[in-house]
Amino acid sequence: MSVSIAYLGPPGTYSEAATLAYVRFFKRKTDTEPLLCAYPSIAQTLQSVAQGQAHLAVVPVENSIEGSVTITLDMLWQLDTLQIQQALVLPIRHALLSRASSLEAIQTVYSHPQALAQCQGWLEKFLPSAQLVPANSTTEGLQYLDQDDRLGVITSQRAAQLYNLPILASAINDYPDNYTRFWVLGKQLSLGGTHTSLAFSTPANVPGALVKPLQVFASRAINLSRIESRPTKRSLGEYLFFIDFEADSSQESVKSALSELASHTEILKIFGSYGVLAIDSSTVLEA
Amino acid sequence: MSVSIAYLGPPGTYSEAATLAYVRFFKRKTDTEPLLCAYPSIAQTLQSVAQGQAHLAVVPVENSIEGSVTITLDMLWQLDTLQIQQALVLPIRHALLSRASSLEAIQTVYSHPQALAQCQGWLEKFLPSAQLVPANSTTEGLQYLDQDDRLGVITSQRAAQLYNLPILASAINDYPDNYTRFWVLGKQLSLGGTHTSLAFSTPANVPGALVKPLQVFASRAINLSRIESRPTKRSLGEYLFFIDFEADSSQESVKSALSELASHTEILKIFGSYGVLAIDSSTVLEA
């Protein structure tokens, strides 16, 4: 039976680009061809694995400009059965696709709210009077382009290639250092690697409740690569903390850190250790 | 000259409800009538104060379910001139407005993505096949209701009252403990109060870079009510940290904490000390 991989579709999204890069990596490693299934939301992508419909899920976790993809963190905490198998880092280069002959003709721009936000400066400069319409994905608006040449869609160059649509402007993101990190999640135990992720809640309203957990890592010179808080959804002011650090959970120092951490936290969930695959932007277009 | 207050409009949004509650508080305190101006985005609301078009701005900071309003934090860091004058905590009760005779007739639901997310469970249970359309505000979709009785809009009960539209279902948010916190921002120095907010960057890639800043507060038994990380937008993995704590910056222990904090951080910005006004949900409808 082939391995099935769920991802946030449809084809042409950045999630698909990350998934295709992972598929090439997976095939080199396992010499088997996985099956891809697109899902319409991050929640459904993750549930498909939790419920046994797919083996692996590829979902975005964090963008270098916009920050965390909070639904991914919230679902990971709630589902409680998924482990991180691999991280993927994808360079993001937005393009404006349109049938318009020039920028002046554009009256409306569709895209995912994160993509609109990432091109905010460019839009204010070149399309100050265009109406910005949020969509469920960076590809949703593409279906309207053929009917109306006053529309534009902010999406990937790969979508232009895939749907044979003209690029009116490219590399329009305000910050050139724009990357999105994805996680490949599955029910099997993680394989180990350079990074480990976990999350915990702390006893409420105790001064310094977060200091002790962080000290556990600092005292062992374990570098935290990320810390993110999320509401517990119980009451305003109560948080969960998501932490990534640069070490494998099989190392002795990490084992002792994790057992000490358990004594300073209320609920502690460890999402596994994994490697990070940096995706070359040139291979995205070949996909 | 009257004081002008900018807020995220249009009328009927939760931001307007918070602003109207603040106006009542402001009038009791100053015995003057402020002028209200609605702006179409959080960025424009804050810029209006930074550029001197308005005296104060009311913007959402955090929701107890969805977490931070990241554009507010990013703009506050960038603009560098705004101080927090007051915090407001508003209870959120979503309703479904529609001209449909029953839920079965609803095919499409419009709302702001945060409101759609906050009613996700209810929507899956009662409107599993409805198409969910993200909008720029909780009121944007209301203009279509009179033309099409297959549409619904998730918004406040106040919007139903204001625009004379029927409520098809009320209190549809998945978590009853749903609150949004707002900040009132201005260029003048903060007035002081029970809470203080600040943000800082840390030297990159130093293990424990966040431990020392947090220890500064823990060692003085100052309770942090919130910590949030945001990307610096320079490169993936570099963060700013936003902290709220429960003390006034004129207290001696806080003064010494802040001067010690400056030595453990790269850039430190203090947004002021302020009081928190809890808004009663019953007064929102009277507004």
Image: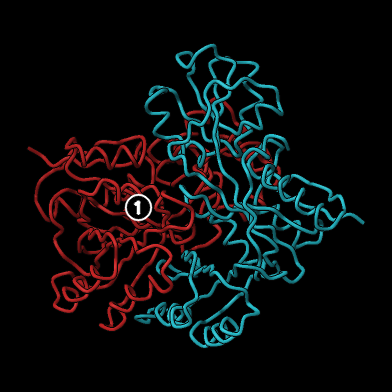
Chain colours: A red, B cyan
Query: Which of these two is toward me, B233 or B208?
Result: B208
| Left or right: residue B61 compared with residue A276 | right
Of the pair B247 and A177, the residue shown nearer to us:
B247
- Is A285 drawn above or below residue B229 in the view shown? above
Instruction: Pick the residue in front: B43 or B233.
Output: B43
Q: Quadrant of residue A283?
A: bottom left
Amino acid type, mark 1: Leu
Q: Horizontal and vertical percent for residue B86?
A: 68, 60
Does B26 sit above or below residue B82?
above
Q: Position of residue B279 (x, y in %)?
A: 64, 48
**Is A190 on the left or on the right of B52, as rendered?**
left
Is residue B171 shown to the viewer in this render?
yes
Q: How many marks?
A: 1
Q: Position of residue B216 (x, y in %)?
A: 47, 82
* Label 1 environment density (alpha carbons within 10 Å; few <14, some 14–19, many ≥20): many
Q: Which residue sits furthest right? A: B1
Work out which quarter of the rendered image holds the N terminus of chain A and state it: top left
Quarter of the image holding residue A9? top left
Which residue sits at x=68%, y=42%?
Answer: B17
Tell me residue B214's x, y (percent). Answer: 44, 77
Q: Does the image show residue A125?
A: no
Q: Residue at x 43, y 65 (%)?
A: A205
Q: Is residue A46 left or right of residue B174?
A: left
Subunit bearing disc 1: A
Residue shown at the point (31%, 51%) measured from the top left: A18
The residue pinned by badge 1 equals A73
Report the side of A143 relative to A199 (left or right). Answer: right
Query: In the current view of this chain or complex, which residue is farthest to the top?
Result: B101
The image shows residue B219, relative to residue B115, as above or below, that is below
Residue A194: which quarter of the image? bottom left
